[in-house]
Image (cartoon, coloured by chain):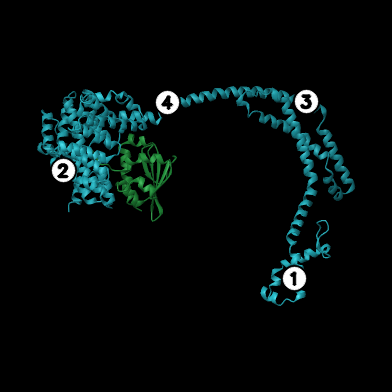
Amino acid sequence: MSLRPLVEGDCGAVNPLVQLGGQFTRDVAHKDEGLTKAQFERSMRSDERLVQEFFGQAAGPPQSFQMDTLLQEMRDINISGDGVSQQQCMQDQVASQWSADFTQQMAPALPNNMVHMQPQPQPQLHYVREFFDGPGTSSRNFYAPPMMRQPYMAIAAGPQQHNTFFDTNTIITENIPMAQKGESVDDWITDYQTSKKENEQTVTNFNEKFWQRLQEEWQKLAEENEHPWLSEYNENLDAYKEYEFAEENPMSELDNAFEKGKEYLSKGDIPSAVLCFEVAAKKEPERVEVWELLGISQAENEMDPQSIAALKRALELQPENQRVLMALAVCYTNEGLQNNAVRMLSNWLQVNPRYQHLLTAHPELHSEQISLASSLIGANKLRELQQIYLEAVRINPAQVDPDLQEALGVLYNLSNEYDKAVDCYRSALHVDPQNAKVWNRLGASLANGSRSVEAVEAYQQALLLQPGFIRVRYNVGVCCMNLKAYKEAVEHLLTALTMQAHTNAARELPNAAAATTAGGQHQMSESIWSTLKMVISLMGRSDLQGYVSDRNLTALNEAFKE
Amino acid sequence: MSLQSDAVFQKIIDGLQDNQAKAKAVNGVFLYKITKDGKVVKEWTLDCKNAKAYEGPAQGIKVDTTLTVSDEDMVDIALGKLNPQAAFMKGKLKIAGNIMLTQKLAPLLKTDAKL
């Protein structure tokens, strides 16, 4: 094409025609002024189309053209800058080469067999660089790069230029006299030798310190005893160690406290019975029955921590007491101490002459290791124990052993299989329908298995049989709360608290007025109070929270009277 | 701003104080973000490592698990009406961090009936 040389530039140089074309096609504002694009095209004649074609051809290059200029500019920058940067690069390379050579020479002397020394050569390298950088900078002045010098000479006047040239020359010769150089090398070698010794010193120091610190750390760990598995084990064993007696017991002068306590228990007045048993336990601390009945009463009194303490004491005195083992297993279950509950139930099986042979096949279950096992292993033990209990049930399927069913029910509660637990308690009740405790356990299993409505029926049975069963009152309260019947929940919880606070025993005694406040405070369960607190705040009655924290039962009874 | 779930957390605080050993057995730090109408309105920290709980973000301790749940659902979980696992599956309960630790939380939240 004849147009080609017009459009294409010479060897990538700027082509003025292309530049013009680019400018014209890109001038959008000018083209669109007053006309839309369609009108412009319609009014175009054939010659104009030719022009358009030409411009269309020309419209292509502008972008590449622009790139060209950019590239050109970059090249220009490179060319002007190159001389300097190349020179610098070379010098830097030489310097690093020198220092590298030098360190290589010195390297065998470095104690590279020591791991802790690895970061140490760094300052020496630095020193090497400093040393070579010194003369390096001055030599850069001396061998001034031609590219640098040319513009400088162009600007500077003649004599001045000579002066500066001479000056730099003398500076260099002054800077590196040979003698000084040798001296500094000697200095450096001695410096290095001393620093090497220092380094060795610091390494040994560091090692000593490190081991010392490690030892201290281990000692600290051992002292703190922070391992969760260890603390879990210890705490579970040590919890509820001591039984706390009521500070002021109105029964303290009673002579036949134990008999009186049993009398109250048969009447269903649990809080009074507890007070009597406490007196008896103080008088006869070696008598198993006292501790046993105290523990069982405290459980019915919704005081699990106290119950566990009393039952543990009973177990110390008589390790093969089946009733105590069962009661303790239940308490541990309520308190969420799975491992302890499993241990109690395996002991229960062991002391039971009818079933103990079953355990011989599983020696690991009745060994002391159970208490040491973590909660994970505990889950396996629980499964195994459930299997053994099921075997025990199968020995005589025709005749149901209610105690065995009760124990199995506890085990299913532990594994959160509430429906199975319900079945166990139902079959136990089939044999012994007058047992309020089992009715309560049935109710609790139902409630925990989210069958609150059925649970209420079971609780009703329990209360019919034993109206003073504090724990059932509490359970009914929890059940009502879970059903969001807050008002009823409060009523039941307040009833339970009132029963605990105003014991019949205290009322029958002459010094009752003084005793009820102090003794009553201790007799009330924390668990009932905290549940009451929750119900009241769920009701939105924050105005009553003060009474709860003050343990002001009369005011609360007054508020919910209507 | 008072929420329904405040009662639940108040109970947890009481429970932690009453039974420190039980709390420490959980051995985790939980941050609850309570939402109302889709917005986080309150935060509670359950520091079971030190057996304490308080309103607001964790103070000077690393949070193991963050749980986000609405005010109403929190109450339902505590009352046993809503199973935490089911709530998690339905997306009502969002858990970030160590999910296994939350399994240990149930006894602290729920008020169980006693055998």
Q: Inspect the image, locate mark 1, and give the three-letter code of the amino acid beneath it.
A: Gln
Q: Which residue is mark 3?
A: A183
Q: Which chain is green?
A: B
Which residue position holds label 1?
Answer: A52
The answer to whether marks 4 and 1 sit on the same chain is: yes
Q: Are marks 1 and 2 in contact (CB under 8 Å)?
A: no
Asked whether disc 4 touches disc 1, contact meaning CB atoms under 8 Å apart, the reply is no
Chain letter behind tag 3: A
Q: Quadrant of residue B64?
A: top left
Q: Nearer the viewer, residue B34 or A368?
A: A368
Q: Are marks 4 and 2 in contact (CB under 8 Å)?
A: no
Q: Colour of chain A?
A: cyan
Query: What number is the disc on residue A222?
Result: 4
Question: In the rendered image of this protein, does residue B60 appear above or below residue A216?
Answer: below
Marks 1 and 2, Cα distance to the nearest angstrom? Answer: 104 Å
Q: Judge by depth and name the residue closer to the eye, A517 or B104.
A: B104
Residue A355 sits above or below residue A69 on the image:
above
Q: Which mark is residue A461?
A: 2
Distance between the alpha carbons at the discs numbered 4 and 2: 54 Å
Distance between the alpha carbons at the discs numbered 3 and 4: 58 Å
Quarter location, residue A524:
top left
**Disc 1: host chain:** A
